[in-house]
Image (cartoon, rainbow, N blue to C red):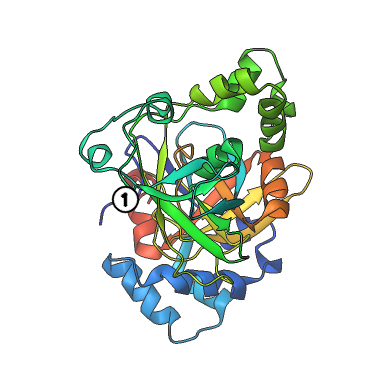
Amino acid sequence: MAPEAKAEATYEVLSFADLDGWAEDDHAAAFKVFVSTCRDMNDPDWRAVCKFAQAGPDPREFFELLFRPVLIDDGQKALFTGYFEPELDGSLRTSDRYRFPVYKMPREAMASNPWLTRRQIVEGDAMSGRGLEIAWVDDPVELFFLQIQGSGRIRLPDGSYLRVGYRGANGHPYRSIGVELVRRGVYDAHQVSAEVIKNWVRRNPDEGRELLFHNPSYVFFREVSQVPADKGPLGAMNRSVTAMRTVAVDPAFVKLGAPVWIEKGGEEPLHRLMIAQDTGAAIKGAQRADVFFGTGDTAGREAGKLKDPGRMVVLLPIQRAYALLPESAL
Protein backbone atom coordinates (compact mmCIF):
# COMPACT_ATOMS: atom_id res chain seq x y z
CA MET A 1 0.00 0.00 0.00
CA ALA A 2 1.92 3.00 -1.26
CA PRO A 3 1.55 6.34 0.55
CA GLU A 4 0.15 9.27 -1.37
CA ALA A 5 2.98 11.59 -0.38
CA LYS A 6 6.69 12.08 -0.69
CA ALA A 7 8.93 10.24 1.74
CA GLU A 8 10.28 13.40 3.38
CA ALA A 9 6.83 14.46 4.59
CA THR A 10 5.66 13.76 8.14
CA TYR A 11 2.24 12.43 9.07
CA GLU A 12 0.04 12.82 12.12
CA VAL A 13 -3.21 10.93 12.54
CA LEU A 14 -5.83 13.11 14.22
CA SER A 15 -9.31 12.49 15.54
CA PHE A 16 -12.43 14.09 14.11
CA ALA A 17 -12.74 16.01 17.38
CA ASP A 18 -9.48 17.77 16.40
CA LEU A 19 -11.14 19.29 13.31
CA ASP A 20 -12.44 22.75 14.19
CA GLY A 21 -16.04 23.04 12.99
CA TRP A 22 -16.38 19.42 11.82
CA ALA A 23 -19.72 18.82 13.54
CA GLU A 24 -21.29 21.96 11.99
CA ASP A 25 -20.38 21.26 8.35
CA ASP A 26 -22.75 20.03 5.65
CA HIS A 27 -21.33 16.52 5.32
CA ALA A 28 -24.02 15.56 2.80
CA ALA A 29 -22.79 18.21 0.34
CA ALA A 30 -19.22 16.92 0.54
CA PHE A 31 -20.42 13.30 0.35
CA LYS A 32 -22.26 14.00 -2.91
CA VAL A 33 -19.11 15.46 -4.46
CA PHE A 34 -16.99 12.54 -3.20
CA VAL A 35 -19.33 10.01 -4.81
CA SER A 36 -19.14 11.87 -8.14
CA THR A 37 -15.48 10.91 -8.60
CA CYS A 38 -14.62 8.09 -6.18
CA ARG A 39 -15.42 5.45 -8.80
CA ASP A 40 -12.39 6.67 -10.73
CA MET A 41 -10.04 5.75 -7.84
CA ASN A 42 -8.34 2.43 -8.54
CA ASP A 43 -6.72 1.34 -5.27
CA PRO A 44 -8.59 -1.51 -3.52
CA ASP A 45 -9.18 0.38 -0.27
CA TRP A 46 -10.53 3.42 -2.09
CA ARG A 47 -12.75 1.19 -4.24
CA ALA A 48 -14.11 -0.42 -1.08
CA VAL A 49 -15.08 2.86 0.59
CA CYS A 50 -16.59 4.08 -2.68
CA LYS A 51 -18.71 0.95 -2.95
CA PHE A 52 -19.93 1.50 0.61
CA ALA A 53 -20.73 5.14 -0.25
CA GLN A 54 -22.95 4.06 -3.14
CA ALA A 55 -25.15 2.16 -0.66
CA GLY A 56 -26.33 5.51 0.70
CA PRO A 57 -25.02 5.68 4.28
CA ASP A 58 -25.43 8.67 6.57
CA PRO A 59 -22.73 11.03 5.24
CA ARG A 60 -21.17 12.07 8.55
CA GLU A 61 -21.17 8.50 9.86
CA PHE A 62 -19.63 7.34 6.56
CA PHE A 63 -16.61 9.63 6.91
CA GLU A 64 -16.15 9.01 10.63
CA LEU A 65 -16.48 5.23 10.29
CA LEU A 66 -14.20 4.58 7.32
CA PHE A 67 -11.61 7.39 7.43
CA ARG A 68 -9.06 8.95 9.71
CA PRO A 69 -7.87 12.58 9.40
CA VAL A 70 -4.15 12.81 8.56
CA LEU A 71 -2.11 16.02 8.79
CA ILE A 72 0.67 15.93 6.19
CA ASP A 73 3.56 18.34 6.75
CA ASP A 74 6.41 18.93 4.30
CA GLY A 75 7.90 21.87 6.18
CA GLN A 76 6.28 24.53 3.99
CA LYS A 77 3.80 27.09 5.30
CA ALA A 78 0.16 26.46 4.50
CA LEU A 79 -1.37 28.69 1.83
CA PHE A 80 -4.93 28.74 0.48
CA THR A 81 -5.84 30.58 -2.70
CA GLY A 82 -8.90 30.51 -4.94
CA TYR A 83 -9.62 29.78 -8.57
CA PHE A 84 -12.66 30.01 -10.80
CA GLU A 85 -13.93 29.37 -14.30
CA PRO A 86 -13.64 32.60 -16.28
CA GLU A 87 -16.06 33.70 -18.97
CA LEU A 88 -14.61 35.42 -22.03
CA ASP A 89 -16.23 37.04 -25.06
CA GLY A 90 -15.22 35.32 -28.25
CA SER A 91 -16.13 34.01 -31.67
CA LEU A 92 -15.55 30.99 -33.86
CA ARG A 93 -14.26 33.38 -36.53
CA THR A 94 -11.51 35.94 -36.32
CA SER A 95 -12.32 39.62 -36.79
CA ASP A 96 -11.03 43.04 -35.79
CA ARG A 97 -12.56 42.51 -32.36
CA TYR A 98 -11.90 38.80 -31.91
CA ARG A 99 -8.25 38.34 -32.80
CA PHE A 100 -6.57 36.50 -29.94
CA PRO A 101 -6.61 32.74 -30.55
CA VAL A 102 -7.34 29.98 -28.06
CA TYR A 103 -5.19 27.14 -29.32
CA LYS A 104 -5.36 23.38 -29.42
CA MET A 105 -2.13 21.62 -28.52
CA PRO A 106 0.23 21.10 -31.48
CA ARG A 107 1.95 17.76 -32.02
CA GLU A 108 5.39 19.23 -31.40
CA ALA A 109 4.41 20.42 -27.93
CA MET A 110 3.24 16.91 -27.05
CA ALA A 111 6.54 15.41 -28.20
CA SER A 112 8.96 18.01 -26.85
CA ASN A 113 9.26 19.11 -23.24
CA PRO A 114 9.90 21.98 -23.00
CA TRP A 115 8.71 23.38 -26.31
CA LEU A 116 8.58 27.05 -27.39
CA THR A 117 8.20 29.79 -24.78
CA ARG A 118 5.13 32.03 -24.47
CA ARG A 119 6.93 34.81 -26.35
CA GLN A 120 7.93 32.49 -29.18
CA ILE A 121 4.38 31.15 -29.51
CA VAL A 122 2.71 34.58 -29.46
CA GLU A 123 5.25 36.46 -31.58
CA GLY A 124 6.34 33.65 -33.90
CA ASP A 125 4.57 31.79 -36.68
CA ALA A 126 4.76 28.23 -35.35
CA MET A 127 0.98 28.13 -34.90
CA SER A 128 -0.03 29.93 -38.11
CA GLY A 129 -2.10 28.35 -40.85
CA ARG A 130 -2.56 25.01 -39.09
CA GLY A 131 -6.19 25.18 -38.01
CA LEU A 132 -5.29 24.92 -34.33
CA GLU A 133 -7.60 27.73 -33.25
CA ILE A 134 -10.59 26.63 -31.17
CA ALA A 135 -11.92 30.21 -31.04
CA TRP A 136 -10.76 33.82 -30.92
CA VAL A 137 -11.35 36.13 -27.96
CA ASP A 138 -11.31 39.90 -27.63
CA ASP A 139 -8.91 40.41 -24.71
CA PRO A 140 -5.34 39.07 -24.44
CA VAL A 141 -5.25 39.75 -20.70
CA GLU A 142 -8.34 37.62 -20.07
CA LEU A 143 -6.82 34.94 -22.31
CA PHE A 144 -3.67 34.97 -20.16
CA PHE A 145 -5.74 34.44 -17.02
CA LEU A 146 -7.79 31.75 -18.77
CA GLN A 147 -4.51 29.88 -19.15
CA ILE A 148 -3.75 30.32 -15.46
CA GLN A 149 -7.18 28.97 -14.48
CA GLY A 150 -6.90 26.11 -16.97
CA SER A 151 -10.54 26.10 -18.11
CA GLY A 152 -13.31 28.52 -18.98
CA ARG A 153 -16.37 29.39 -21.01
CA ILE A 154 -16.34 31.51 -24.15
CA ARG A 155 -19.53 33.49 -24.74
CA LEU A 156 -20.24 33.56 -28.50
CA PRO A 157 -22.00 36.42 -30.33
CA ASP A 158 -25.27 34.46 -30.60
CA GLY A 159 -25.42 34.02 -26.81
CA SER A 160 -24.33 30.38 -26.77
CA TYR A 161 -21.26 29.12 -24.93
CA LEU A 162 -18.20 27.14 -25.87
CA ARG A 163 -16.41 25.52 -22.96
CA VAL A 164 -12.69 24.78 -23.06
CA GLY A 165 -10.54 22.71 -20.72
CA TYR A 166 -6.86 22.16 -20.13
CA ARG A 167 -5.15 19.98 -22.75
CA GLY A 168 -1.48 20.50 -21.96
CA ALA A 169 1.29 23.06 -21.74
CA ASN A 170 4.59 23.93 -23.39
CA GLY A 171 6.66 22.50 -20.56
CA HIS A 172 8.16 25.74 -19.25
CA PRO A 173 7.80 26.53 -15.53
CA TYR A 174 5.01 28.81 -14.37
CA ARG A 175 6.27 32.20 -13.17
CA SER A 176 3.91 34.53 -11.31
CA ILE A 177 3.54 38.00 -12.81
CA GLY A 178 2.07 39.17 -9.50
CA VAL A 179 5.29 38.20 -7.73
CA GLU A 180 7.23 40.01 -10.47
CA LEU A 181 5.26 43.22 -9.94
CA VAL A 182 6.08 43.02 -6.24
CA ARG A 183 9.75 42.41 -7.02
CA ARG A 184 9.79 45.52 -9.22
CA GLY A 185 8.29 47.56 -6.41
CA VAL A 186 5.08 48.35 -8.31
CA TYR A 187 2.92 46.88 -5.52
CA ASP A 188 3.30 45.45 -2.05
CA ALA A 189 2.47 41.75 -1.74
CA HIS A 190 -0.84 42.38 0.07
CA GLN A 191 -2.05 44.64 -2.76
CA VAL A 192 -1.73 42.10 -5.55
CA SER A 193 -4.80 40.34 -6.94
CA ALA A 194 -5.92 39.21 -10.38
CA GLU A 195 -7.98 42.38 -10.89
CA VAL A 196 -5.09 44.62 -9.81
CA ILE A 197 -2.78 42.87 -12.28
CA LYS A 198 -5.31 43.08 -15.13
CA ASN A 199 -5.86 46.79 -14.56
CA TRP A 200 -2.12 47.50 -14.44
CA VAL A 201 -1.50 45.64 -17.71
CA ARG A 202 -4.32 47.55 -19.42
CA ARG A 203 -3.07 50.90 -18.14
CA ASN A 204 0.44 50.09 -19.32
CA PRO A 205 -0.05 48.24 -22.62
CA ASP A 206 3.60 48.06 -23.73
CA GLU A 207 5.02 47.19 -20.32
CA GLY A 208 2.01 44.99 -19.70
CA ARG A 209 2.66 42.94 -22.83
CA GLU A 210 6.23 42.38 -21.68
CA LEU A 211 5.04 41.49 -18.19
CA LEU A 212 2.90 38.67 -19.58
CA PHE A 213 5.98 37.27 -21.31
CA HIS A 214 7.65 37.04 -17.88
CA ASN A 215 5.65 33.81 -17.55
CA PRO A 216 7.11 31.47 -20.21
CA SER A 217 4.45 28.80 -19.55
CA TYR A 218 1.72 28.56 -22.19
CA VAL A 219 -1.43 26.45 -21.89
CA PHE A 220 -3.28 24.74 -24.73
CA PHE A 221 -6.95 23.77 -24.60
CA ARG A 222 -9.52 21.28 -25.82
CA GLU A 223 -13.21 21.84 -26.37
CA VAL A 224 -15.36 20.30 -23.62
CA SER A 225 -18.74 21.70 -24.55
CA GLN A 226 -20.35 18.32 -23.82
CA VAL A 227 -20.30 19.37 -20.17
CA PRO A 228 -23.77 20.81 -19.37
CA ALA A 229 -23.96 24.54 -18.68
CA ASP A 230 -25.25 23.93 -15.14
CA LYS A 231 -22.22 21.79 -14.26
CA GLY A 232 -18.77 23.00 -13.32
CA PRO A 233 -15.76 22.68 -15.61
CA LEU A 234 -13.80 19.45 -15.82
CA GLY A 235 -11.07 19.05 -13.24
CA ALA A 236 -8.00 16.85 -13.29
CA MET A 237 -10.19 13.77 -12.74
CA ASN A 238 -12.10 14.58 -15.95
CA ARG A 239 -15.28 15.19 -13.97
CA SER A 240 -17.10 18.44 -13.25
CA VAL A 241 -15.84 20.30 -10.20
CA THR A 242 -18.18 21.85 -7.62
CA ALA A 243 -18.07 25.42 -6.29
CA MET A 244 -16.82 25.60 -2.68
CA ARG A 245 -16.56 21.81 -2.40
CA THR A 246 -13.73 21.13 -4.87
CA VAL A 247 -10.13 21.93 -4.03
CA ALA A 248 -7.01 21.71 -6.21
CA VAL A 249 -4.04 20.05 -4.52
CA ASP A 250 -0.55 18.75 -5.18
CA PRO A 251 -1.06 15.08 -6.14
CA ALA A 252 2.48 14.31 -4.94
CA PHE A 253 1.02 14.62 -1.43
CA VAL A 254 -2.75 14.25 -1.73
CA LYS A 255 -4.48 11.58 -3.78
CA LEU A 256 -6.98 12.93 -6.28
CA GLY A 257 -10.48 12.07 -5.11
CA ALA A 258 -9.60 12.14 -1.41
CA PRO A 259 -11.72 14.16 1.04
CA VAL A 260 -9.79 17.01 2.67
CA TRP A 261 -10.74 19.12 5.66
CA ILE A 262 -9.97 22.83 5.18
CA GLU A 263 -9.36 25.20 8.08
CA LYS A 264 -8.63 28.62 6.64
CA GLY A 265 -8.14 31.86 8.51
CA GLY A 266 -8.28 35.41 7.13
CA GLU A 267 -11.18 37.84 6.86
CA GLU A 268 -13.61 35.10 5.85
CA PRO A 269 -12.68 31.90 7.71
CA LEU A 270 -13.55 28.64 6.01
CA HIS A 271 -13.94 25.34 7.88
CA ARG A 272 -15.28 22.81 5.43
CA LEU A 273 -14.96 19.29 4.05
CA MET A 274 -13.95 19.40 0.40
CA ILE A 275 -12.81 16.90 -2.22
CA ALA A 276 -9.41 16.97 -3.94
CA GLN A 277 -10.53 16.82 -7.56
CA ASP A 278 -8.13 19.14 -9.33
CA THR A 279 -4.50 20.22 -9.66
CA GLY A 280 -2.68 23.36 -10.79
CA ALA A 281 0.78 24.37 -11.97
CA ALA A 282 1.22 26.70 -8.99
CA ILE A 283 -0.17 24.25 -6.42
CA LYS A 284 2.92 22.63 -4.92
CA GLY A 285 3.28 21.27 -1.39
CA ALA A 286 1.43 19.25 1.22
CA GLN A 287 -0.33 22.32 2.66
CA ARG A 288 -0.99 24.18 -0.59
CA ALA A 289 -4.54 24.25 -1.91
CA ASP A 290 -6.72 26.17 -4.36
CA VAL A 291 -10.44 26.47 -3.64
CA PHE A 292 -12.84 26.44 -6.61
CA PHE A 293 -15.30 29.35 -6.36
CA GLY A 294 -17.46 28.78 -9.43
CA THR A 295 -18.00 30.40 -12.83
CA GLY A 296 -18.01 34.05 -13.91
CA ASP A 297 -16.90 37.47 -12.73
CA THR A 298 -18.35 37.33 -9.20
CA ALA A 299 -16.62 34.01 -8.54
CA GLY A 300 -13.45 35.50 -9.99
CA ARG A 301 -13.52 38.48 -7.66
CA GLU A 302 -14.05 36.25 -4.64
CA ALA A 303 -11.36 33.81 -5.70
CA GLY A 304 -8.91 36.64 -6.31
CA LYS A 305 -9.24 37.88 -2.74
CA LEU A 306 -8.29 34.56 -1.17
CA LYS A 307 -4.69 34.28 0.01
CA ASP A 308 -4.74 32.98 3.56
CA PRO A 309 -2.96 30.61 5.93
CA GLY A 310 -4.57 27.66 7.68
CA ARG A 311 -4.21 23.90 7.53
CA MET A 312 -5.43 21.08 5.33
CA VAL A 313 -6.11 17.62 6.77
CA VAL A 314 -6.54 14.67 4.41
CA LEU A 315 -9.13 11.97 5.17
CA LEU A 316 -7.68 8.56 4.34
CA PRO A 317 -9.08 5.04 4.66
CA ILE A 318 -8.17 3.81 8.14
CA GLN A 319 -5.57 1.21 7.23
CA ARG A 320 -3.88 3.57 4.75
CA ALA A 321 -3.79 6.36 7.34
CA TYR A 322 -2.01 4.25 9.95
CA ALA A 323 0.35 2.75 7.35
CA LEU A 324 1.83 6.22 6.86
CA LEU A 325 3.01 6.44 10.47
CA PRO A 326 6.52 5.34 11.50
CA GLU A 327 6.61 2.18 13.60
CA SER A 328 7.62 4.20 16.66
CA ALA A 329 4.29 6.07 16.53
CA LEU A 330 2.13 2.95 16.43
Q: Is residue 144 visible?
A: yes
Q: Point out residue 294 in the picture as x, y percentages from the top left corner.
A: 63, 58
Q: Point out residue 154 in the picture as x, y percentages from the top left corner.
A: 56, 55
Q: Is residue 276 visible?
A: no
Please give left or right for residue 140 compared with residue 106 in the image. Answer: right
* Residue located beneath label 1 in the image: 3
Q: Nearer the viewer, residue 247 or 71?
A: 247
| 214 over 289 or under it: above or below | above
Instruction: Determine the residue located farthest toward the right in the rendered image.
Output: 267
| 317 over 117 or under it: above or below | below
Please give left or right for residue 19 compared with residue 250 in the image. Answer: right
The quadrant where residue 326 appears? top left
Look at label 1 and name its amino acid.
Answer: Pro
The quadrant where residue 293 appears? bottom right
| 250 over 62 or under it: above or below | above
Please give left or right for residue 286 compared with residue 178 in the image. Answer: left
Please give left or right for residue 330 compared with residue 145 in the image. Answer: left
Q: Nearer the viewer, residue 328 or 299?
A: 299
Q: Nearer the viewer, residue 150 or 223?
A: 223
| 118 over 164 or under it: above or below | above
Q: Point out residue 279 in the picture as x, y percentages from the top left corner.
A: 44, 48
Residue for point 35% across, 34% down:
8
Residue for point 39% across, 62% down:
238
Instruction: Determine the residue located farthest toward the bottom in the rendered image.
Output: 55
Mark 1 residue crowding within 10 angstroms, few (<14) / some (14–19) / many (20+): some
